[in-house]
Amino acid sequence: MDIQPSPSSIPQLIDTGRIEEALQLIDTALGHSGDNYELYLLKGKAHLKNQQWHLAQSAFLKADELNPQGNAREYCTLIEDIMQFYHKDYYNP
């Protein structure tokens, strides 16, 4: 019998590098609950940990759309700073 981690264990999965498991749980939870700020924030954090900047930014932008008073905008700014540092050609053709 395979025991699935609960959605409350998602942050722990992300912290321990089990990103794919975390993303599967997030997508399942989003399928059941619909748009959820916390889930999109976790999804962004998971992609951020995997250095998947564009996917992280998309998740954070969705979280910001759902809750403009949250801290998702700060993560978007962080990603923009990372992209400007690592991918200067994206901003300076």
Image (tube, rainbow, N blue to C red):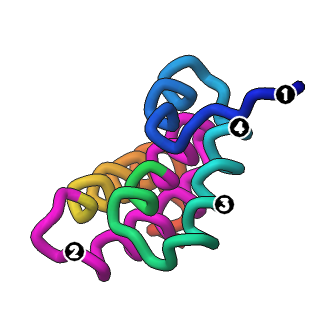
The residue that label 1 is drawn on is 2
Left or right side of 25 for 38:
left
Dot placed on the residue nearer the N-terminal end, 4 or 3: 4
Q: x, y percentage for residue 32?
A: 59, 71
Please identify, in this view, whether the residue under mark 1 or under mark 2 is nearer the observer.
Answer: 1
Q: Disc 3 and disc 2: Cα gap in Å? A: 21 Å
Q: Which residue is found at the position 73% from the left and 39% from the top?
A: 20
- Residue type indicated by callout 1: Asp
Q: Secondary structure at mark 1?
A: loop
Mark 1 to mark 2 CA distance (whole Å) = 35 Å
- Estimate the spatial distance between the alpha carbons at disc 1 and disc 3, rounded to whole Å: 17 Å
Residue 75's place in the image compared with 18, above or below, is: below
Q: Calculate the distance from the C-alpha at mark 4 to the C-alpha at mark 3.
A: 11 Å
Marks 1 and 2, the one that precedes in the sequence: 1
Q: Are marks 2 and 4 in contact (CB under 8 Å)?
A: no
The reply to whether discs 4 and 3 touch (Cβ–Cβ < 8 Å) is: no
Residue at the (51%, 57%) spot, across then down: 56
Report the residue marked by disc 4. 21
Q: Nearer the viewer, mark 3 or mark 2?
A: 3
SS for dot 2:
loop
The numbered dot on residue 28 is 3
Query: Percent x, y for residue 34?
Result: 50, 78
**Number of residues whose C-alpha sits closer than 10 Å to that of mark 2, classed few (under 14), some (14–19) or many (20 or more):** some
Q: Amino acid at mark 4?
A: Glu
Where in the figure is residue 40, as x and y percent of width and height?
Answer: 44, 62
For the residues labelled 3 and 2, say whether their Cβ atoms are less than 8 Å apart: no
Q: Is 69 displayed left or right of 13 in the figure?
A: left
